[in-house]
Every structure is written in structure tokens, then in C-alpha cells.
């Protein structure tokens, strides 16, 4: 019975902590700490540090998200607001934080001219990019379908021109610091998905905005 009672007490403490983490609310957190105090002996102050995410001292709660968490949260909000959640993907890897923008929402087929109506999405992305001091790399990508165009002799030309026009938009229209920005074109040689299906090719026609890790 003593072992069982200890187990139940520990489980209670665990679930209270999980509840507090999932609901960042000062009053609820104070109630949690008070309950923890009644279980473990003190509810005046406490801390839960996981990458400096939550700290509690003297009953005051501070939520300190990492830069990547903040970027992901803000970008998710803006894509949902503009109904573009299916056209925007996020990825974090050894290079940094990447925003994958499907080319269909930025350009018409076979063109590098930004489409009408992208100002809201691009403006919101620019608002977020202004908050970072890291290098920003704009990368153009295509599918593997050979391009037949007088303006663009190959997918290399198209991918570079799309990346360049995207970068110029951020610099000239949104006043992003040009010293932070570089431009790369990869044509079809860095696909996200297989080019064997229309859906895969659509995902590969994209512009990536890479916030390079320091």
C-alpha cells in the first residue's frame, strides 16, 4: 500500500506538470504550484527549465521561446490566416530554418514574374525576416520537366531568376537588408519529393527561404 500510494503521488505530480506546460497561464500555473506544494511540501516558488522555456520565481511566470519556436509559430499563423498552409512547409536542419514556398503561389507557370496577390504573404514573411540578423539565402528550384522557353533556355535560368526576383522583392519592396541576402538556383537537382507524380513535381517547384544558422 505504501508503494502504491507513492506511485499515485508521483503520477499526480507528473500530470500536474504536463497540464501546466500545455496551458501557459499564470493563474493556472500558480494553482499548480500551490497544489505541488501541498503534495511535496512547498508552493512558494519553483522552476521548470527546458532550454529556458518556462521559469517561475516569486509567483511570476515567464515564457521564453527560442528563436526557431517563435519563427515557426508566427509563420504558421500567417499561412493559416492567408489560407496557404498547404503551400508552405517548414524545415529545420543543420543549415538552419527553411521556409518552402510552392512556386504555384508565387509565379505563373514558366514565369519568374511574381504573381498578383502575393503581397500579403510576402509582406508577412518579410516582417518576420526583419527580426533576424542571420544570413538569408533565397533558393530557386524547379521540377525535372525540360523547359521550352525563349526567355529561359533551361531550368537553371528559371530557378535562378525566380530566386533573384524574390530577393529583389524583399530588398526593394520590404526593405530587408541586402547584406543579409544571397541568391542560389538549383534547377531540378534538389527535389523535396519524387518527380514521378504531378503532386511531387508541384512540391519541387518552389522557392526556399533559408535562415542560416549562426
Image (cartoon, rainbow, N blue to C red):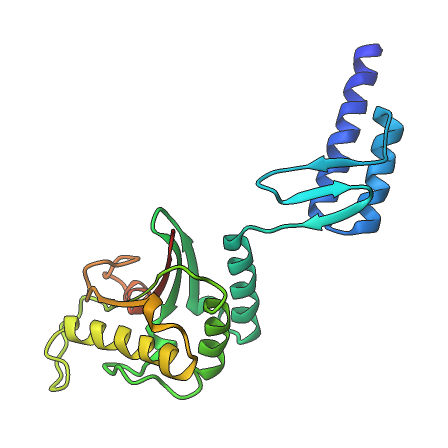
Which residue does the image show at 14% across and 81% down from the upper left? 152
In the foreground, 133 or 148: 133
Residue 86 in sight = yes
Q: Quadrant of residue 154?
A: bottom left
**53 lies above or below 175:** above
**30 lies above or below 41:** below
Which residue does the image show at 57% across and 41% down from the upper left? 51
User: Residue 209 location, x and y as percent?
Assistant: 36, 65
Instruction: Left or right? Give the position of 166 relative to 119.
Output: left
Which residue does the image show at 42% across and 79% down from the upper left? 175
Q: Quadrant of residue 147?
A: bottom left
User: Residue 134 location, x and y as percent?
Assistant: 40, 59
User: Residue 110 location, x and y as percent?
Assistant: 23, 81
Residue 140 in sight = no
The residue at the far bottom in this view is 116
Quadrant for the N terminus in the image: top right
Instruction: Left or right? Give the position of 13 relative to 168.
Output: right
The residue at the far top in this view is 2
Query: How many numbered marks appear?
Result: 0
Amino acid at each position: 500500500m505504501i508503494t502504491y500510494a507513492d506511485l499515485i503521488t508521483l503520477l499526480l505530480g507528473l500530470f500536474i506538470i504536463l497540464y501546466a506546460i500545455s496551458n501557459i497561464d499564470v493563474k493556472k500555473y500558480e494553482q499548480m504550484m500551490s497544489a505541488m506544494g501541498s503534495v511535496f511540501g512547498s508552493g512558494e516558488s519553483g522552476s521548470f527549465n527546458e532550454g529556458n522555456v518556462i521559469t517561475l520565481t516569486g509567483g511570476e511566470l515567464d515564457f521564453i521561446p527560442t528563436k526557431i519556436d517563435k519563427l515557426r509559430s508566427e509563420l504558421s499563423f500567417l499561412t493559416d490566416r492567408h489560407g496557404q498552409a498547404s503551400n508552405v512547409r517548414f524545415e529545420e536542419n543543420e543549415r538552419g530554418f527553411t521556409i518552402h514556398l510552392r512556386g504555384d503561389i508565387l509565379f505563373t507557370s514558366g514565369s519568374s514574374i511574381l504573381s498578383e496577390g502575393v503581397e500579403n504573404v510576402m509582406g508577412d514573411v518579410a516582417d518576420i525576416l526583419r527580426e533576424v540578423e542571420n544570413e538569408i539565402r533565397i533558393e530557386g528550384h524547379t521540377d525535372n520537366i525540360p523547359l521550352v522557353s525563349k526567355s529561359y533556355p533551361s531550368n537553371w535560368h528559371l530557378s535562378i531568376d525566380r530566386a533573384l526576383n524574390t530577393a529583389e522583392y524583399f530588398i526593394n519592396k520590404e526593405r530587408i537588408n541586402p547584406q543579409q541576402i544571397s541568391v542560389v538556383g538549383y534547377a531540378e537537382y534538389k527535389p523535396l519529393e519524387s518527380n514521378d507524380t504531378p503532386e511531387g513535381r508541384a512540391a519541387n517547384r518552389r522557392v526556399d527561404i533559408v535562415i542560416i544558422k549562426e
